[in-house]
Image (tube, helix red, strand yellow):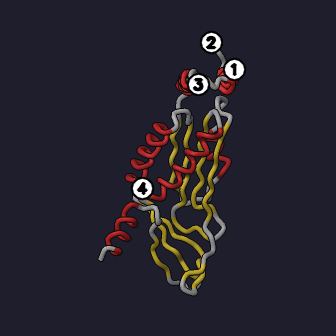
Amino acid sequence: MVSIERSERLCRRDESSHSSECLMLLLHQHQRMAESEERRDVFKLSRDWLSVQEVVDTVSSSSCGAISVFIGTTREDEVDGRTVIGLEYEAYELMAQSEFTKLCADIRERWPTVTHICVHHRLGWVEVGQASVAMAISSPHRHDSQQAIQRCIDQLKANIPIWKKEVYDTQDSSWKENAECSWATRNKLSSESV
């Protein structure tokens, strides 16, 4: 059996019509390697501080040379003369888990070499500067995990039922929808057509 590294070197050198064969060989080798290790998809909603190290450890694998990480933090923002001092998160937890499972299937279909996926999201009060979400994705090479992590955060914000309420220095608050939400887009389109 030709090693993955040797196959990659051969494919980089081969600019002929055989390059699609090289890519298929590489994909097949990566899939066999990934199949030898059980894939993990971990989703956790927590009222506690998020541990980035725990998220990274969850996706670590000796077969992976890349772990891509995204950490979303609560930022201080100015809204109508009021300053955001924190966010309050709520979720429909059973549906969130179901949507996360769909998201993982979508990521694996797009990037078959993705090995492990882990997302931890805060619930409850999160003050400015604290992490609201921490996620990591591992794969044998960086390209797939980097693209997959971007897809993961975009789709999490668009489809997973987690809501946030901005709390201001004036002690009032307002619920906010993510611009990525499909229902937000529909609402914008319908209001523009009126």
Foreground disc of the pair 1, 4: 1
- Identify the mark nearer the N-term, 2 or 3: 2
Marks 4 and 1: in contact by CB < 8 Å?
no
Instruction: Give the quarter of the figure containing the N terminus.
Output: top right
Foreground disc of the pair 3, 4: 3
Give the left or right position of residue 91, taking residue 143 as reference: left
Q: Which residue is drawn at 64% across and 64% down?
A: 130
- Identify the mark nearer the N-term, 1 or 2: 2
Disc 2 residue type (three-letter): Met
Instruction: Give the Cα separation between the discs numbered 2 and 3.
Output: 18 Å
Q: Return the residue at label 4.
A: 159
Q: Nearer the viewer, residue 54 or 3?
A: 3
Compared with residue 170, is residue 33 higher up or lower down, i.e. above or below?
Answer: above
Disc 4 residue type (three-letter): Asn
Q: Return the residue at label 1.
A: 6
Q: Residue at x 65, y 35 (%)?
A: 141
Instruction: Give the Cα separation between the discs numbered 2 and 4.
Output: 42 Å
